[in-house]
Image: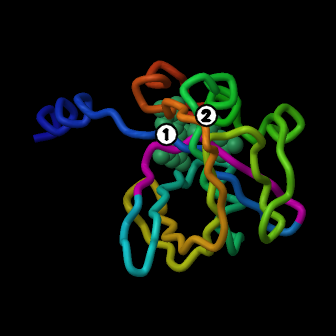
Amino acid sequence: MSDAFDDFVDMLDYPMFVVTTRAGDDLAGCLVGFATQASIDPPTFLVGVSIDNHTYDVARRATHLAVHALSAEQIELARLFGGETGDAVDKFTRCAWHRGPEGLPILDNVSGWFAGAVRDRFAMGDHIGHLLAPIAGETSTRADRLLSFADVRRLQPGHGRS
Ligand SMILES: Cc1cc2nc3c(=O)[nH]c(=O)nc-3n(C[C@H](O)[C@H](O)[C@H](O)COP(=O)(O)O)c2cc1C
């Protein structure tokens, strides 16, 4: 079954996001593909954060996360958040961002973002599900093609196997 499942997921393409968060003075963020809208009413969005990531260390203490959709041209930003780890570098000295709701770091010039309150956390396997209820956000009026898994599938995750 595992070969069939691997073949199945190999066929897929899906949007990629950068998820950022804050707990106290600690900021963190990483590239995620395990993320989707999960309900219409109430509106919710599910983000899977690897327990190995620096981002999880902050997200597990955070009340809110911010989810950013990048344009396909923002590959360098994807590389920073997906190919580097906050255990080794301060990603927020290497990109443009501003403070948003709840003091969250919001990346500048992205195609869209929303901030969500963490309503629930649960084990999904090696990733922890964070169920978010949106509280604020903005979407660009540009007709960007969004970054998807196909654009970053060769990127080596900055934090090991996650
Ligand atoms: C294509 C791709 C998809 C990824 N999807 C996820 C994901 O859904 N959840 C996650 O926690 N990490 C995911 N990662 C891994 C993290 O983005 C990566 O390990 C990052 O460097 C972690 O940074 P941190 O240690 O600062 O949190 C993905 C990486 C890549 C390249």
Q: Amino acid at mark 1?
A: Met
Task: Write down the region rendered in magenta.
Answer: 25-36
Q: Residue at x 89, y 62 (%)?
A: 25
Camera-near label (1 vs 2) is: 1
Which residue in the rendered view is the most extreme toward the top? 154
x%, y% of residue 15?
Answer: 44, 40
Asked if residue 146 shows in the view, the reply is yes
Say which residue label 2 marks.
82
Magenta span: predominant SS is strand
Q: Is residue 45 left or right of residue 79?
A: left
Q: Amino acid at mark 2?
A: Gly
Quadrant in the picture for the N terminus? top left
**Other residues around mark 2 within 10 Å, as few (<14) / some (14–19) / many (≥20):** many
Q: Residue at x 61, y 51 (%)?
A: 139
Say which residue label 1 marks.
16
Check residue 32 for magenta coloring. Answer: yes
